Image: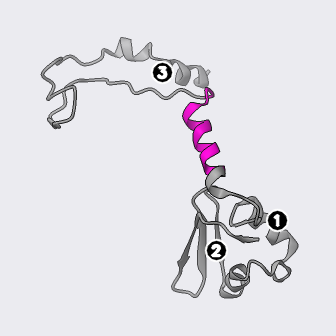
Amino acid sequence: MRLSQYNIILPLRDGCYIVYNTYSGAAFRMDEEAMNALKRYGDSQSIPEADLTRLLKAHILVNDNVDETAMFGVEHNKAKFGSRSLEITILTTYRCNLACSYCYQGKGDVLRDAMSPCTLNRTPICQERDAEKT
């Protein structure tokens, strides 16, 4: 076993540590004794079985044969190419005053109208929101 490459270890003022795994989003607060046991990750006998299971499930510790980079790539491609969700951006107005040089909208020069409340309520997001209320 080894520590995950996605761990961030933050020391706290009270001598404890926060171990945060950016892959799983899990975070643990550990005292110095637990942190030392974690750093000796190859010595899994120093970590109680229940804690070891939790650390493996949270990806704080990973088995030696796990290719974390490939695992991340698979998850990334699932999110990128999967059809389980649809993300859309709704522009409710073109009245932008930022005038970013790279923006195709310009500085609100093309259109100056805003989306009417009636049109906004017909968008899938508002319809989904209204369905959840009922």
Residue 74 located within the stretch drawn in magenta? yes
- Spatial CA distance of label 3 from label 1 is 42 Å
In the foreground, 101 or 108: 101
Q: Tell me the SS state at disc 2.
A: strand
Quadrant where the image shows the N terminus? bottom right
Q: Is residue 18 above or below residue 103?
A: below
**Percent position of residue 30, x then y:** 66, 78
Say which of marks 3 and 1 sits in front: 1
Which sits earlier in the primary sequence, circle 3 or circle 1?
1
Q: Amino acid at mark 3?
A: Cys
Q: Amino acid at mark 1?
A: Thr
The residue at which mark 1 appears reads as 53
Say which of marks 2 and 1 sits in front: 1
Q: How many marks?
A: 3
For the residues bearing labels 2 and 3, Cβ distance under 8 angstroms:
no
The residue at which mark 2 appears reads as 29
Q: Is residue 14 left or right of residue 50?
A: left
Residue at position x 26%, y 23% in the image: 93
In the foreground, 16 or 57: 57
Secondary structure of the magenta portion, mostly?
helix
- Spatial CA distance of label 2 from label 1 is 16 Å
Residue 47 seen from this side: no
Query: Quarter of the image holding residue 59?
Result: bottom right
Label drawn at residue 126: 3
Q: Amino acid at mark 2?
A: Arg
Quadrant where the image shows the C terminus? top right
Residue 116 located within the stretch drawn in magenta? no
Numbered range of the magenta stretch:
71-84
Q: Is residue 28 left or right of residue 98?
A: right
